[in-house]
Amino acid sequence: MRCQINYSRLMNNAMKVLAVVALFACQPPVQEEKEAAASEPQYDVAAYVWPSCHHDERFGDMLWPDGMGEWEVIKKGTPRFEGHYQPKVPLWEYEPDNDPKVMERWIETATDYGVNTFIFDWYWFGDGPFLESSLNDGFLKASNNEKMNFYLMWANHDVKQNYWNVHKYKDVDTLLWDGAVDLVNFKIIVDRVINNYFKKPNYYKIDGKPVFSIFSVANLVEGLGGLDEAADALNYFREETKNAGFPGLHIQLINFGVPNENALQSIKALGANSVTKYNWGGPHPEDYVQWGVESMDKRQQWDEALDIPVFPNASIGWDDSPRFPHKGKADIVHYNKTPEAFASFLQKSKEYCDSHPEQPKLITIFSWNEWIEGGYLLPDMLYGYQYLEAVKKVTYGGSEKTGP
């Protein structure tokens, strides 16, 4: 197993990717021809949905008292250097993500441009669900939701007091919620997920098995009392899923950094079926191309270390400065951050899928609407539809190679 970054290879890859970026920049816009629109992409392109931009019944008054969810914080974003695009301004205004009419437009737009799956960030805090309304009242009540698949990514991470509204809580960084849950809550989650979501006809499945993604392995293990106990809990989840009429359960874990002994041991012990990323993760260099090339190297290391599918991720950017007033230029990915650069890395994800015919052709994208973290496909006042056009160009385009 190789856990050291090969900087020589990184530089070579960076030059190749920059060449691809230039190639994409010179391409004409995607033609809206009936033939292309009628064709079906051969890839499952799944974009994460961060469902924070609505008033949450349980914790909305506490976190975002303006009544519009995290739009309250997004609108207060301030530029940290000359040319820094803050605040981010959506083309479709500050829409609530739990409105079925809003979700209907999202679904039409996503499927028109090659995104056929939404991965909803899903939370369980304080012995109950959090931010479910985007999925329950928005997506599942949208009249056209059958056009699109969806699945859950259990975002079982910790949250500090000032993480989601620094304007209200300022320097109070004590823990608000612990993402770890005990077995009692875990069993409630299993029942809720199977009955409310798995049984929907458009819940995303691999080999007939509903896919359930888990963000933090560490919190899963901590909450359930240890690695063996967590493995037993997942086996319980699998059996309950089978009892509901499915052939099994597909557990997908989010990986971070590069593989190490502890991570590999946990993945094996938990019987994970696949891994992917939420986004390319840290560290966050200022140069987007460098960030992407380093991520491709990490992906290769995971690919070599595991014998289960590693699903590629393409990330649009990173800028969480609206949440953190102390962050500046060095904390933001901004150089070479363009739709063309994103298209080149999405093309690399497509080629990775093609080189792994033994696994489903699933690509995850960060993200559909992470305005607060600077990675979103939804059209805005700066780029318009360019990031969506990039997805359509790659997804519906040919399979010509862009490099080794």
Image (tube, helix red, strand yellow):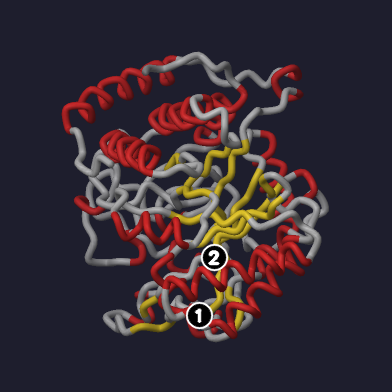
Q: How crowded is mark 2: few (under 14 residues within 10 Å), some or many (20 or more)?
A: many
Considering only vertical position in the picture, is 148 above or below 358?
Answer: below
Give the alpha-carbon distance from disc 1 to disc 2, as whole Å: 12 Å
Q: Is mark 2 on a helix, strand or loop?
A: strand
State left or right for residue 351 relative to residue 245. Answer: left
Counting from the top left corner in percent of width and height, residue 185 is at: 58, 82
Q: Which of 106 and 83 is in front in this view?
A: 106
Q: In the image, what residue occupies the spot 49% across and 72% down?
A: 230
Residue 361 x/y as whole percent: 58, 34
**Quick check: 11 above or below 154?**
above
Q: Residues within 10 Å of mark 1 (few under 14, many from 20)?
A: many
Please give the name of the residue rendered at 48% of the width and 51% of the height, measured from the top-left corner: 89
Q: Total of numbered circles in the picture?
A: 2
User: Which amino acid is tagged 1?
Assistant: Val
User: Is the C-beta separation of discs 1 and 2 under 8 Å?
Assistant: no
Q: What residue type is labelled 2?
A: Trp
Dot 1 falls on a residue whose secondary structure is: loop
Q: Nearer the viewer, residue 252 or 42?
A: 252
Spot occupied by residue 308 in the image (x, y as percentages of width and height): 49, 44
Q: Name the residue under label 2.
A: 154
| Residue 113's disc number | none
Mark 1, mark 2: which one is toward the viewer?
1
Residue that numbered label 1 is attached to: 181
From the viewer's perspective, is 112 left or right of 19?
Answer: right
**Hey, which quadrant is residue 394 in on the image?**
top right
Q: Quadrant of residue 42?
A: top right
